[in-house]
Image: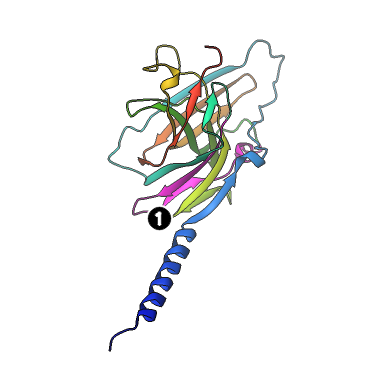
Amino acid sequence: MRLSHITFVTIALALALVLCATTLAQEVASLDLTTIEARTDLRSPEATSTVTGPRGSIHSEAPCYDSTHYAGAVRTKLVSLDSTHYEVGDEPKFEVTVENVGTAPVKIPFSPHLADLQPKDATQKFAYNELRLELWIAAGEDWRANTGGSVSLYGTDDRMGTMLTLSPGESVRIIGMGYIALPPDGMEVPGGINSIDHIEAVATLHRREILLTATAEATVDREICLDITKGQSVQINLTNPQE
């Protein structure tokens, strides 16, 4: 028995609705950091004697060395910016999605409140996870710099509600504010600032340990290896008002 044209159309519409529902269901959480006053200031231990002079700081960074053991695979897409024309010093509002494009779940921190993760005893060393989203300004395919600003999310497994597990195909949406700065000295843009033509978003995952004293702080930052795929970028025009 042959199916009628109406039956085929009905089946096609049903499949389209199912696919649409599946696509919408892939976004499991969203966070608008422009509407949140993030609690990021950490408490320092009280001094036992009079403290003079500037506060000391020791910082150690360890990039991902073993790319053969990824913690997962993600794709970062810059969905939109609030403008297509910027000047150096502007603060673009951006919207980014981070999607698990691998075959295994990926756990990411998803709280803007770093201070909530600090132990009651401010002298106690503590660790946390950090998801860092950076905006990279770029000229063509061969030049880019991470001077578009960044936002961070934090979390630990022992603090409920601060970590989020992305199953394969699931994504999160994050809205934040950047800050466009000039590249550091010695990193000249081929063709000058006016040749910068788009902005990209890059997500990295870190494990950080921090120890605070009344006069200093020490941090160790270890990047967690991710198989990172660059998604959509946004075309822009950039000028320097001082030129």
Residue 43's spot in the image, x, y percent?
67, 30
> Residue lying furthest bottom in this view?
1
Marker count (numbered)? 1
Q: Is residue 49 magenta?
A: no
At horizontal 36% and vertical 54% (from top left) the residue drawn is 104
Residue 155 or residue 93, whichever sits in front: 93
Q: Is residue 72 above or below residue 23?
A: above
Residue occupying the far right of the picture: 50
Please state which of residues 64 and 194 is positioned toward the viewer in this rendering. Answer: 194
Q: Amino acid at mark 1?
A: Gly
- Whole-percent x, y for residue 157 in the image: 52, 48
Tell whether position 115 is magenta.
yes
Query: In which quadrant of the rendered view does residue 22 lie?
Result: bottom left
Q: Is residue 156 visible?
A: no
Please state if 165 lies on the left or on the right of 229 as rendered.
right
Point 45% across, 24% down: residue? 60
Q: Position of residue 164 (x, y in %)?
A: 51, 51
At 70% from the left and 25% from the top, the residue drawn is 46
Q: Is residue 106 left or right of residue 130?
A: left
Residue found at x 36% / y 77%: 8
User: In x, y percent, where is residue 17?
Assistant: 45, 68
Mark 1 = which residue?
A: 169
Q: Residues within 10 Å of mark 1 (few under 14, many from 20)?
A: some
Highlighted range, magenta: 92-120
